[in-house]
Amino acid sequence: MSSPVVEIEAVGVDLDDCPDCLAGNLNWLLTQAHYALGTELATAFEPLGITPRGHSVLAAAVGGGLTQKELAELIGLDKTTMVVTLDELEAAGLAKRVASAVDRRARVVEVTPAGRAKVEAADEIVTRVQADVLDSLGDAGAGEALLDTLGRLVRTRLAEPAACKGFRRREPRGRA
C-alpha cells in the first residue's frame, strides 16, 4: 500500500519557479521538507487520533522516569507547548502525570497502555512514510546518507540553537 505523497506544489512551491537564491538555501529547503513531511504524517496519524507532536512526546516518555521539563528539553518543545500537549494526551487517556519520587514539585510523565498501543501504531506509520520519502530519492543508499548527514548536523554544528531575540520554535496558536 502506497502512502500519500505531498508534492512540493501542494505547499505552494514549484521548484521550477523557485528563485535561485532559495534553491541552495539549507534553511529554506529544510523548512519546506519539514512542512511537507509534517503534513503527511499528521494526515496519516488522523485515524489514530494523535498528532506528530503527541507521538513524539509519547515515544520519548515510553521509557519512563522523565519529567515534563526533561521531555520538553529532549524533544525541543517550549514549556507551554509541552503542557498543552500533555493536557491533550491525558484527556485522551494516553498519558498521565504523576508525582516524582525524587522531587515533589516535579511531575513525571507515564504512558498508559492505550498510549503504548498508539506509539506502536504510529511508529509503523512513521516507518512506512519515512521509507517512502527516502525511497523517492531513487539512488540506493541516498536515504541512509541523508539521515546520517542530518543526524551528524544535529549532534554537532546544529546541536544548540543560537541565542537570539524574537525567534520562536513554534508560532503561538490563536485563541478561539
Image (cartoon, grey):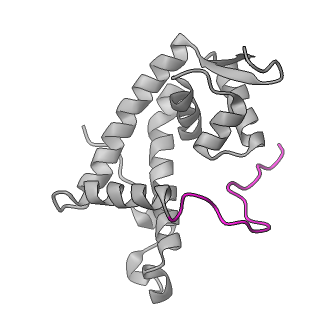
The answer to whether residue 6 is above or below residue 88 is: below
Most frequent secondary structure within the magenta stretch: loop
List the single residue furthest toward the top: 113
Q: Nearer the viewer, residue 125 or 76?
A: 76
**Left or right of residue 135, residue 103 in this image:** right
Residue drawn at point x = 53 percent, y = 31 percent: 60
**Left or right of residue 58, residue 109 in this image:** right
Q: Nearer the viewer, residue 39 or 53?
A: 53
List the single residue furthest toward the left: 140
Q: Quadrant of residue 164?
A: bottom right
List the single residue furthest toward the bottom: 20
Q: Quadrant of residue 74?
A: top right
User: Could you say where residue 54 lies in the image, as x and y percent from the top left?
Assistant: 59, 33
Residue drawn at point x = 51 percent, y = 30 percent: 59
169 is within the stretch colored magenta: yes
Q: Quadrant of the N terminus?
A: top left
**Left or right of residue 26, residue 129 in this image:** left
41 is within the stretch colored magenta: no
User: Could you say where residue 133 lies in the image, as x and y percent from the top left?
Assistant: 32, 52
List the single residue furthest toward the front: 102
User: Could you say where residue 145 lies in the image, as x and y percent from the top left?
Assistant: 27, 59
Residue drawn at point x = 46 percent, y = 70 percent: 29
Q: How many marks can you see?
A: 0
Q: Magenta region: which residues?
A: 157-176
